[in-house]
Image (cartoon, rainbow, N blue to C red):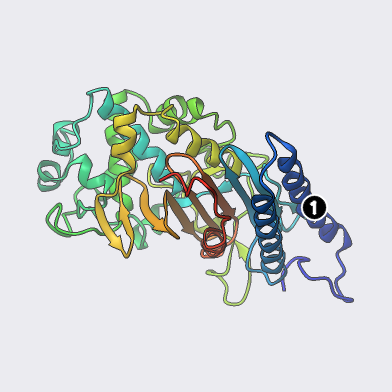
Amino acid sequence: MVGCMKRSASSPCPRRRSSMRIVAALALLVCAACAADGPAAPAAQTSADSAFVTALRARLEAAMQTGEFSGAVLVVRDGRTLFEGAYGLADRERGLPNTPLTQFRVGSMNKMMTAVAALQLAQAGTLRLDAPLGTYLRDYPNAELASTVTAHHLLTHTGGTGDIFGPEFMAHRLELRATSDYLQLYGTRGLQFAPGAQHVYSNYGFILLGALIEQLSGKSYYDHVAARVLAPAGMMATGFAPEDSLVPGRSVGYTRQLVPGALVSSAPTLPYRGTPAGGGYSTVGDVARFAAAVRERRLLDSAHTTLLLAGKVAVGQGAQYAYGFFDRVVGGRRFVGHSGGAAGMSGVLEFEPNGGYVVVVLSNFDSPAATQLATFILDRLPATPAGGGN
């Protein structure tokens, strides 16, 4: 057992356990307070909500005690908080607890923000989704890729553009500081398959989308997304600051992938900073604000929001990949969103695109820390009269 998630006579750690209990108790206060907001809910709904919160709280407490989870959870329904809580430690060495305001690395969840930025350019008429990349990236090294792969292919992982992770990445991870650095390292690489022939998840494809955004906006990816996506959505705690920058609320990631049987910092695996493919940081509240901004059409008009979220490529039973979002049906409800995971980070956003539930789980542990809990939540969401806002 790591940290002080389970008290024993030999290692009582009263201060850490007390901190975690205080944070968990805050979740109860939030849940109790939300019941007092707005019009009174029907008795049956109140009872179902209470049972859901009790089951979720018990699951989170158990997952923390067994070392399965460290992070934060937020469940919102129709704009009202149903549950919010944080568990475990943001910094085990200093004994700092996670809180709902802790900033967690979100992995590939950033793909949703990259996709929104790309669709904004399409909405403005600056980017054609069916135009070859070479139309905009005229000096791209691989001519075949530049002449055949489109933004549509990149947004749906059907371009055959491959991944970025592997020996090359680890050898150069601290030198890869800008989108152009990734293109210099991987730009001569050929296609894995003919564009459109398959769906194979491609982090490099979203790096290329970042390059398109930079070329067409005249700004760095980071500045453009901050101004056009994060600020309009009210995501003031979300960013891509380099790993060697001081971000006081950013948690330490912990992984079991480096040392067998041990939970250690994931710092030796991290890139210099997050990229258009993922690796930035956010809070559960900011991620929920992003979901609200998308479905309220504050980032894109109605037509382009529909285009963004509508499934385009089948990726499993009841699931499709849209543009940087998964589109799937769970328990008769339609949810869109994305997960993210790497060493020391795990996160999930799932939301109903036309109102209803928003579920956010962020963790500073390896996957599947967040995805397991998100599945638990989605399988137990209380039924609502509206039937899920499909």
Residue 227 on image: x %, y %: 45, 24
Q: Is residue 211 visible?
A: yes
Which image quarter is the N terminus in?
bottom right
> What kind of residue is marked 1?
Ala
Q: Is residue 286 placed above or below 267 in the rendered structure?
A: above
Q: Could you tell me which secondary element the residue under label 1 belongs to?
A: helix
Q: Between 172 and 359, which is closer to the camera in this rendering?
A: 359
Task: State the image coordinates of residue 299 (x, y, percent, origin top left).
Answer: 41, 28
Residue 380 screen position, x and y as percent:
57, 61
- In the rendered view, tell whether residue 39 sits above or below residue 142: above
Q: Position of residue 304 (x, y in %)?
A: 30, 32
- Name the quadrant containing residue 339: bottom left
Q: Is residue 125 positioned above or below 141 on the image?
A: above
The one nearer the camera, 316 or 149, is 316
Residue ID at (36%, 51%): 327
Which residue appears at 38% of the width and 47% of the height? 277
**Crowding at mark 1 (Cα within 10 Å: few <14, some 14-19, many 20+):** some
How many discs mark residues in the rendered view? 1
Depth check, front residue: 30 or 101: 30
Relative to 8, 79 lies left or right: left
Q: Name the quadrant containing residue 303.
A: top left
Residue sitting at x 14%, y 42%:
146
- Residue depicted at x 30% and y 44%: 310
> Does residue 178 show up?
no
**Residue corresponding to mark 1:** 25
Q: Is residue 78 above or below residue 27?
A: above
